[in-house]
Amino acid sequence: MTALQQAGRFITFEGIDGAGKSSHIEALAAWLRGHGHEVVVTREPGGTPLAERIRDLVLHAPMDALTEALLVFAARRDHLQQQIEPALARGATVLCDRYTDASFAYQGGGRGFALDVLVQLEAWVQQGRHPDLTLVFEASPVTAATRRAAARVPDRFESQDLAFFERVSAAYAQRVAQAPQRYVRLDAERDKAAVWTQIEAAVRGRGWW
Ligand code: TYD
């Protein structure tokens, strides 16, 4: 990286399954590339060959809550070291479909796993690497369930009941309340064009580009 080159920005996308975040990640990548930026699009769990193998286990193999928490953070460690940190260091913008907020929401809120252990894992694994901006797609658990039913075969998380997703949503809201400046909440009940308008405003609002 030259002296004039900025370190890249790290942007994450969060929300309950079916809130509609995935299609917007590629749209934001295209928008940024159109403005001349290098963009890396990735996801969690996953993003490296090792972490993608862990993803397959986490989404499909029965396991207890501690195993699940350890695996998502193990995947995150590899992803950070192999993919995210090198990309940010060379000045690329990293768009990541879920990150640690999802661990607090799904393992913490959904499964009821100990938050103090998640806080420890977060500190060990990330060494202070937090997103610069997190877009939170907010849709009600009922809307999200309707969208999921139309779209895909459910995995271990998507097959959970409404009460699980109520807890996941509440845990996301709690994370936002703890560091509101890092997040932009999007009304994901609205149609795709209206959600995109909110994303563009959120990104422009940061004044980075
Ligand atoms: P998701 O990213 O929504 O992928 P897709 O759109 O292909 O279904 O699914 C990943 C699932 O993993 C999602 O249900 C949430 C879960 N998850 C956790 O439980 N903990 C985590 O730390 C992460 C990153 C994801």
Image: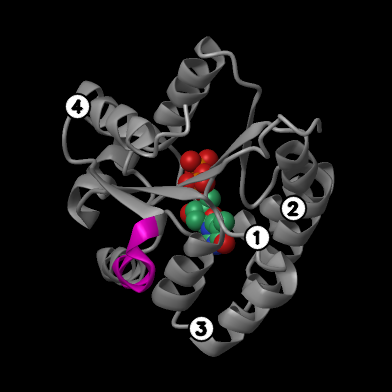
Cα separation, mark 3 vs mark 1, equals: 22 Å
Mark 1: secondary structure: loop
Q: Main secondary structure of the magenta part?
A: helix
Camera-side residue of 44 and 40: 40
Which residue is the site of mark 1? 129
**Residue drawn at x 23%, y 41% as measured from the top left:** 188
Q: Are marks 1 and 2 in contact (CB under 8 Å)?
A: yes
Mark 3: secondary structure: loop
Give x and y (percent) for residue 82: 83, 46
Camera-side residue of 111 and 29: 29
Disc 2 residue: CB within 8 Å of ligand 1:
no
Q: Residues within 10 Å of mark 2 (few under 14, many from 20)?
A: some
Which residue is the site of mark 3? 113
* Magenta region: 173-181
Which residue is the site of mark 4? 194
Q: Nearer the viewer, mark 4 or mark 1?
A: 1
**Residue drawn at x 60%, y 20% as measured from the top left:** 37
